[in-house]
Image (cartoon, rainbow, N blue to C red):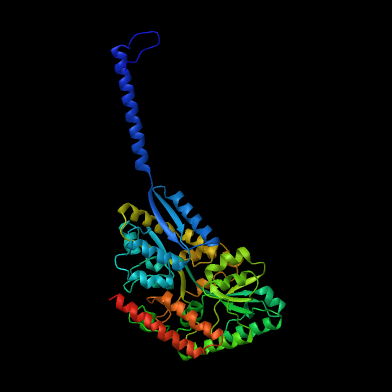
Amino acid sequence: MLLTAPGKGPLCSKENSMSKKFVAAGVMAASLIAAGAASAAPTEITMWHAMANTLGDWVADVTKDFNAKTPQCHLTSTYKGSYDQTMTSGIAAHRAGRSPNILQVFEVGTATMMFSKGAIVPVGELLDKAGYEFNPKDYIPAVYGYYSTADGRMLSYPFNSSTTVLYLNLTKFKNAGLPTEPDKLPRTWPEIEKAAKALKAAGETCPMTTSWMGWTQLESFSTWHNVEYATLNNGFGGTGARLMVNSPLHQRHLENLARMAKEGTFVYKGRGNLADATFYSGECAINMGSSGSLGNIRRNAKFEYMTMPMPYYEGVPDAPQNTAIGGASLWAMAGKSDEQNRCVAEFFHYLSDPQVQANNHMRTGYLPVTQKAFEIAKASGYYEKNPGADVAVKQMLKTTDKSRGIRLGYLPNIRTIVDEEFEKIWSGKATAKEALDAVVRRGNEQLVRFERVTK
């Protein structure tokens, strides 16, 4: 079709030629702009996690901050349910060839991830390939040791490491006539039992409870008292480990809890972290649980509270030692492009910043992971303003072969067995010895099965 000017004939050939050049230039410019936009588009990576409510808000903010500081990468973090559900979803997605770039796995899934051939890329290797130096000496010993191989290779990144601590409702303590000065608060199990009796006498219906029964009362109990939970250094020495939790000390402890349950000074509130809400709602006066629940306590508690070290039995050699690690770490999933792996390394590098770690620690109650982050938090006056907030860190500064942590295959299954057998104690259907013997027998069946599938 010929183009014409108003009131005139066809445009002259010169004008037509200029028009064509103009159009061509415009097309080229548009192409260059589009190409520039394409080259500037950030590399997309994904992370599946198990953080809900207060902690979910934290993960969202961490994601937003990383994206703002690292424009060449864009992280999308997605809540996938509980720890168990997130791990199960991640493994199923890997088998289907559609796993996320990063998967958050709770600490009891560490051995399973380690022996999942071809499923993960060790974090140390990922950081090294991206040109970032990883120095294990920077990390709190118990944290680094748990997520590394015997030769010191970091396998996953300790994102939200926690440990077991003791929470006390000081308002209820005052009402029961109990002292609330830090140096007079209970530190041993007999002192805990004495306080629980006073609280019950003052009318409290739930003097003491605990969350994560297997973690707090068996795993952490073992490392805190520097006794074996399982052979082969609690599984760090190989997949042939077997449970040791029916020792005289473990039996003594469970018999004491069984007696307290009958007297009403200890009240079982269910599996997992169900007991946590009964503490910050004001129902239960004493709770043993994760240091990572501190954020929820701050948000919800309408009373004065204190964080204390876990109680121990006097006379046990080397007790107290250190509590067991909890929380979760981040695993880089295999089968991704070099560009995506580079951005995953960028995210881990971002998380390695001591100031970022300190901020995460002070906001959530999770461990600061590195010594530098701990010093930053200390220098800021955080621990002076929040007495007891440094308890979790101090409990993790020294480890032995027996107290490094619990790293066993199928440990989530073993925790379920612990819940099932211990519930028989609370209902009067089994003695402490019977329950512990059953845990060892059934738990070892799981360990034998894990050893077979990993050979």
Q: Residue at x 39, y 63 (%)?
A: 90
- The quarter of the image holding the N terminus is top left
Residue 401 vs residue 211, the one in the foreground: 211
Residue 376, image x, y percentages: 51, 62
Residue 372 vs residue 290, the one in the foreground: 290
Decide if residue 154 is on the left or right side of residue 358: left
- The quarter of the image holding the C terminus is bottom left
Residue 419, image x, y percentages: 49, 79
Relative vertical location of residue 164 with respect to residue 27 in this rendering, above or below: below
Q: Residue at x 32, y 61 (%)?
A: 334
Relative vertical location of residue 299 with respect to residue 28 in this rendering, above or below: below
Q: Residue at x 62, y 69 (%)?
A: 280
Residue 323, image x, y percentages: 48, 77
Q: Is residue 249 visible?
A: no
Residue 178 vs residue 380, the one in the foreground: 178
Relative vertical location of residue 157 with respect to residue 263 in this rendering, above or below: above
In terms of image quadrants, where is residue 347?
A: bottom left
In terms of image quadrants, where is residue 28?
A: top left
Residue 43 vs residue 98, the one in the foreground: 98
Decide if residue 331 is on the left or right side of residue 389: left
Q: Is residue 149 visible?
A: yes
Residue 134, image x, y percentages: 36, 63
Number of labelled discs?
A: 0
